[in-house]
Image (spheres, rainbow, N blue to C red):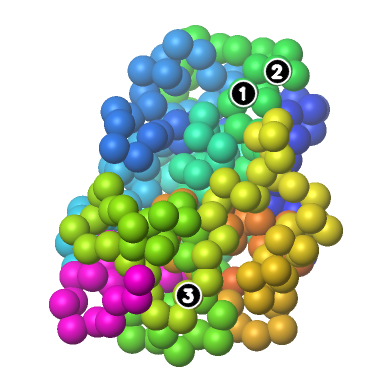
């Protein structure tokens, strides 16, 4: 299993031969276009998470997956090609960039990586910064959905190992600052995304991540799925698991989709 990550030094070496997507975003805050305009990786194209990487909120949760047609069109506008590697980054520890990574992988792109350490790592490494946006040539990416595993609301409770990637207090149901119902899906274990990273903001080593997840009962020996609040930040755990050599499924609707049906059980 190839690493889903690329370091700032590695990106600098291949910058002219990859498509770079800037996915800066903060949950509940403004989009990242203003930050992109102030400075970005040279040649990067800004991708809006809400507009390009999600469908409108509804029964599928706060950030349902976009339709195949909409996603393909967005990636072509961003210059994504089938035969050219893609690197994605944000300024949110990879929590937003991971969504682009997963969607591209799910739709069949063979070579996508996330900048380890995100935008701060690029700046700290002395990477060049560009303030002028460059219009990319139209891409030829063809979306072929199904290349990454997913589970729906009807199957998620039957997954042998279910991981909740939210903060511990949200998992326990002590607080819920975003969704109208607190708690978690019955049987889920909690591995918060914040535990995937070292103090410098980069992902832990494969051995460290294997130990972290094994402590929660996630070993890869049984089918595993991950969810979060709206299906975005859960991908951070999926990336960590891939670094550890474990392939897991995403429950895209996540907690915000689960609670749209009041008959579904809630555990606190």
Is any atom of residue 124 visible in this view?
Answer: yes
Q: Out of 20 and 125, give the one closest to the viewer.
A: 125
Instruction: Give the side of residue 141 with respect to residue 256, left or right.
Output: right
Separation of residues labelled 2 and 1 (CA atoms): 6 Å
Tell me if mark 1 has few (under 14), some (14-19) or many (20+) residues whose alpha carbon lies within 10 angstroms of its own: some
Instruction: Give the side of residue 198 with respect to residue 57, left or right.
Output: right
Q: Considering only vertical position in the picture, is 190 above or below 55?
A: below
Q: Which residues are magenta?
A: 249-268
Residue 133's image quarter?
Answer: top left
Which element type, helix, strand or loop, lies under badge 2? Answer: helix
The residue singled out by tag 1 in the image is 120
Tell me if mark 2 has few (under 14), some (14-19) or many (20+) residues whose alpha carbon lies within 10 angstroms of its own: few
How far across and down, in percent of the image, does residue 52 sit?
A: 34, 45
Q: Main secondary structure of the magenta part?
A: loop
- The reply to whether the C-beta atoms of the residues labelled 2 and 1 are less than 8 Å apart is yes
Which quadrant of the rendered structure holds the N terminus? bottom right
Is residue 260 within the magenta segment?
yes
- The reply to whether the C-beta atoms of the residues labelled 1 and 3 are less than 8 Å apart is no
Residue 3's image quarter?
Answer: bottom right
The residue singled out by tag 2 in the image is 124
Instruction: Give the side of residue 268 with respect to residue 136, left or right.
Output: left
Instruction: Kindly identify which numbered label has been placed on residue 136.
Output: none
Which badge, 1 or 3, comes first in the chain's sequence? 1
Is residue 94 within the magenta segment?
no
């Amino acid at each position: 299993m190839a690493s889903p990550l690329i370091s700032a030094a590695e990106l600098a070496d291949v910058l002219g031969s990859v498509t770079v997507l800037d996915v800066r975003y903060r949950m509940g805050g403004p989009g990242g276009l203003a930050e992109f305009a102030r400075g970005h990786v040279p040649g990067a194209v800004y991708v809006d998470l809400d507009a390009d990487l999600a469908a409108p909120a509804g029964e599928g949760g706060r950030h349902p997956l976009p339709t195949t047609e909409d996603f393909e069109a967005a990636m072509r506008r961003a210059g994504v090609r089938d035969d050219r590697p893609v690197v994605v980054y944000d300024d949110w520890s990879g929590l937003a960039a991971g969504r682009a990574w997963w969607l591209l992988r799910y739709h069949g792109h063979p070579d996508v990586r996330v900048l380890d350490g995100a935008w701060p790592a690029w700046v700290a490494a002395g990477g060049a910064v560009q303030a002028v946006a460059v219009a990319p040539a139209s891409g030829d990416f063809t979306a072929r959905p199904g290349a990454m595993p997913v589970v729906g609301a009807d199957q998620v409770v039957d997954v042998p190992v279910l991981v909740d990637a939210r903060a511990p207090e949200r998992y326990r149901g002590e607080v819920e600052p975003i969704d109208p119902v607190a708690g978690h899906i019955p049987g889920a274990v909690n591995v918060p995304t914040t535990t995937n990273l070292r103090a410098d903001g980069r992902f832990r080593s494969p051995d460290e991540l294997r130990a972290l997840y094994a402590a929660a009962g996630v070993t890869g020996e049984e089918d595993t799925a991950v969810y979060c609040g709206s299906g975005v930040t859960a991908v951070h755990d999926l990336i960590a698991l891939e670094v550890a050599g474990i392939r897991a499924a995403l429950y895209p609707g996540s907690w915000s989709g689960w609670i749209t049906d009041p008959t579904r059980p809630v555990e606190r």
